[in-house]
């Protein structure tokens, strides 16, 4: 099958100029906010709209900050535009900030997992748009691990609602950012004025490689598409005393701890004959995060068939 290259929402901005005409625009983004020719969404909106504010999710708009580190607002060196932090003292923009814009937009690559913070940054900003009567615009992007597979448990929000799980959706949600925005807005009653600028030539079965788009690391610990696949399973180890591989060059593809015997764990896991995955014994020493500078025994998770 010969696929046409997927056309991103941001690449269709000329078709939707009426949405942005005579409006002050804010943009939530990071390095993944690019067109297929690598031109940044910041640059595109700065040229084609009245871009007046940037909003930074976790890791910053340049993805230069490690997981969990808070950041403050600052002026972007490249554009001179104010960057407001959505991962600092607050995760919701205030009325004072929202008064500076007419439209809040987002262009960010999701990874397809319920506990990825970017989707809740989007939800919180949609809530602010509803509260302060602003419009919210999503420049849609692919789900890199496809939209056909939906797997995992449903979050119990009565007990476990947080910034890594705000709505009762499954672990592997099988939606694009635009579809998530519609779900949050309609099913979970945010009820903001929402516009989703859709992609062209995108099918739900597509893995990221099928889109023919460039892969940009969305966060420091999600370097490859393979990482995005295992992240759905191994990120849950963040809530345990087992390392999820942060501080190594292959986070989430490694799990382990100082007391684990690699060969024994690999043998036990492989005895289940799980389809499409092989667990190889491996020792590793994280440079930061859990068990920094301590030798850990564990396994490397090899995907043999997605």
Image (tube, grey):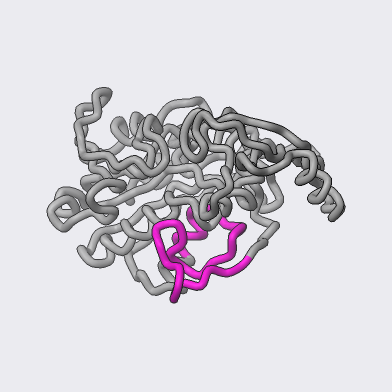
> Given the current orientation, which residue lies at the most extreme front position?
259
Residue 88 falls left or right of residue 100: right
Residue 214 in view (yes/no):
no
> Given the current orientation, which residue lies at the most extreme top position?
78
Q: Position of residue 184 (x, y in %)?
A: 44, 66
Q: Position of residue 47 (x, y in %)?
A: 30, 30
173 falls in the magenta region: yes
Residue at screen point 15% across, 58% down: 95
- The image quarter in which residue 191 lies: bottom left
- The image quarter in which residue 46 lies: top left
Residue at screen point 23% across, 67% down: 131
Q: Position of residue 244 (x, y in %)?
A: 58, 43
Front residue of 137 and 207: 207
Front residue of 139 and 160: 160
Query: What residue span does the magenta drawing correspond to?
Result: 153-182
Q: Is residue 64 above or below residue 113?
A: above
Residue 123 falls left or right of residue 24: right
Residue at screen point 81% across, 47% down: 276
Residue at screen point 66% across, 50% down: 146
- The image quarter in which residue 52 lies: top left
């Amino acid at each position: 099958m010969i696929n046409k290259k997927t056309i991103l929402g941001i690449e269709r901005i000329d078709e939707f100029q009426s949405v942005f005409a005579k409006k002050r625009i804010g943009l939530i983004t990071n390095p993944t906010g690019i067109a297929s020719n690598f031109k940044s969404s910041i640059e595109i909106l700065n040229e084609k709209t009245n871009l007046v504010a940037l909003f930074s999710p976790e890791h910053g708009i340049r993805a230069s900050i490690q997981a969990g580190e808070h950041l403050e607002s600052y002026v972007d060196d490249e554009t001179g535009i104010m960057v407001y932090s959505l991962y600092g003292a607050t995760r919701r923009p205030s009325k004072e900030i929202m008064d500076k814009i007419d439209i809040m937009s987002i262009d960010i690559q999701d990874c397809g997992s319920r506990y990825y913070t970017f989707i809740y940054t989007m939800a919180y900003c949609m809530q602010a748009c509803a509260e302060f009567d602003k419009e919210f615009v999503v420049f849609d992007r692919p789900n890199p691990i496809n939209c056909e597979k939906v797997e995992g448990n449903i979050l119990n929000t009565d007990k476990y609602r947080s910034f890594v799980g705000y709505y009762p959706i499954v672990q592997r949600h099988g939606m694009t950012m635009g579809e998530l925005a519609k779900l949050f807005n309609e099913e979970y009653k945010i009820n903001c004025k929402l516009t989703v600028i859709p992609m062209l030539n995108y099918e739900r079965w597509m893995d990221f490689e099928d889109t023919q788009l460039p892969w940009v690391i969305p966060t420091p610990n999600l370097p490859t598409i393979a990482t995005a696949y295992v992240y759905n399973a191994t990120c849950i180890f963040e809530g345990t005393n087992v390392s999820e591989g942060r501080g190594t060059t292959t986070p989430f593809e490694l799990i382990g701890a100082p007391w684990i015997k690699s060969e024994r764990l690999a043998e036990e896991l492989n005895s289940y004959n799980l389809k499409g995955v092989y667990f190889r014994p491996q020792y590793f020493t994280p440079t930061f995060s859990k068990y920094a500078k301590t030798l850990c025994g564990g396994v490397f998770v090899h995907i043999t068939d997605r």
